[in-house]
């Protein structure tokens, strides 16, 4: 079976399972580059069954030759492994040679977290420049700790401001409910009062053409507001999610509860925020203790 056919088959399966557009785009790009490596000029592209471990290791070496970061290499390997695992399950392959590729170890980096003061200043300052729609999604990003893909996937029926709950669809199309109250709820109410209705459009957040707002536009706007208000161009939508989790933990929230709110499948993913809090405590100690 041709490699490109296998990729199309796998991406179709991901879409059937409810993978986000962001996931499909990234996997599609990484797998297309993988196939392109083996498509030499004036030669037929190999059948997927013809790919052996030496050729796979040669491809892996090519990634390092390109000067890619460890994170990028790990992501590309993960995409190839996942596809080969799928092909093995479907009976296209008899063995998963991609599983024998060695994954480079990545340094554990703690997320950069905005302080509560910086986050508040950013949201307060953004009101001077933003319209109701943008203020609503900024407040939801911080007030609910949701991913940007979850934000743009919100439909009108997913939010119940009277009850104070928001239904979001996370990774793997798994649904969860998170509380929405205070400033976030008020911002959404102001936006709904001016939101232009379009027949048949279920999306909560609309773009200038009346369709669903995209994640790339949200990223661009978040960066724009952060630069205008704080002068920091490194802020992105996930910065609010990091801040949400860290600030909850700092104020005494239970780690298990934060895991549920964030939609993490494993507690170990949530535990990185405890390391951030400890790092902050160490900084406070170093500044304030006379014997530090």
Image (cartoon, helix red, strand yellow):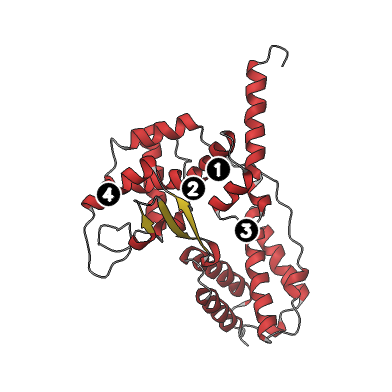
Secondary structure found at label 2: loop
Q: Residue at x 31, y 65 (%)?
A: 202
The image quadrant of residue 36 is bottom right
Q: Which mark is residue 265?
A: 3
Considering only order in the chain, which callout, 4 or 3, is on the residue closer to the N terminus? Answer: 4
Horizontal side of residue 199 vs 28, given as left or right: left
Residue at label 1? 245
Q: Residue at x 65, y 83 (%)?
A: 46
Q: Earlier in the sequence, mark 3 or mark 1?
A: 1
- Evaluate if marks 2 and 3 touch, with contact meaning CB atoms under 8 Å apart: no
Instruction: Locate residue 71, reporting x and y percent.
Output: 64, 54
Left or right of 66, for residue 12: left
Q: CA distance from mark 2 to mark 3?
A: 15 Å
Q: Earlier in the sequence, mark 4 or mark 1?
A: 4
Left or right: 59 as drawn, with respect to 178: right
Residue tagged by mark 2? Answer: 145
* Residue 91 image position (x, y, % from top left): 69, 87
Question: Residue at left 68%, top 58%?
Answer: 64
Residue 138 falls in image quadrant: top left
Mark 1 neighbour density, 10 Å: few (under 14) some (14–19) many (20 or more): many
**Marking on residue 191:** 4
Residues at marks 4 and 2, CA–CA distance in whole angstroms: 19 Å
Measured from the top left, where is residue 83 in percent x and y? 63, 74
């Amino acid at each position: 079976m041709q490699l490109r056919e296998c990729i199309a088959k796998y991406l179709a399966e991901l879409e059937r399972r409810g993978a986000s557009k962001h996931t499909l785009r990234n996997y599609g790009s990484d797998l297309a580059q993988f196939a392109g490596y083996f498509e030499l000029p004036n030669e037929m592209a190999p059948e997927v069954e013809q790919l052996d471990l030496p050729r796979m290791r040669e491809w892996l070496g090519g990634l390092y030759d390109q000067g890619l970061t460890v994170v990028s290499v790990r992501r590309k390997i993960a995409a190839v492994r996942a596809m080969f695992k799928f092909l093995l399950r479907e009976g296209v392959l008899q063995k998963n040679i991609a599983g024998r590729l060695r994954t480079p170890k990545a340094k554990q980096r703690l997320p950069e977290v905005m302080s509560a003061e910086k986050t508040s200043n950013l949201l307060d300052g953004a009101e001077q420049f933003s319209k109701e729609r943008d203020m609503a999604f900024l407040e939801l990003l911080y007030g609910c700790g949701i991913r940007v893909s979850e934000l743009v996937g919100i439909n009108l029926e997913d939010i119940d401001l009277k009850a104070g709950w928001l239904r979001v669809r996370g990774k793997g199309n798994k649904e969860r409910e998170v509380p929405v109250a205070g400033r976030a709820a008020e911002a959404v109410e102001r936006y709904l009062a001016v939101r232009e209705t379009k027949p048949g459009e279920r999306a909560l957040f609309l773009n200038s053409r009346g369709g669903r707002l995209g994640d790339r536009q949200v990223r661009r706007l978040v960066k724009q507001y952060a630069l205008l208000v704080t002068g920091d161009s490194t802020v992105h939508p996930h910065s609010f999610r990091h801040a949400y989790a860290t600030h909850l933990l700092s104020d005494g929230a239970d780690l298990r509860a934060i895991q549920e709110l964030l939609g993490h499948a494993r507690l170990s993913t949530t535990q990185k925020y405890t390391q951030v809090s400890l790092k902050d405590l160490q900084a406070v100690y170093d500044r304030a203790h006379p014997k530090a």
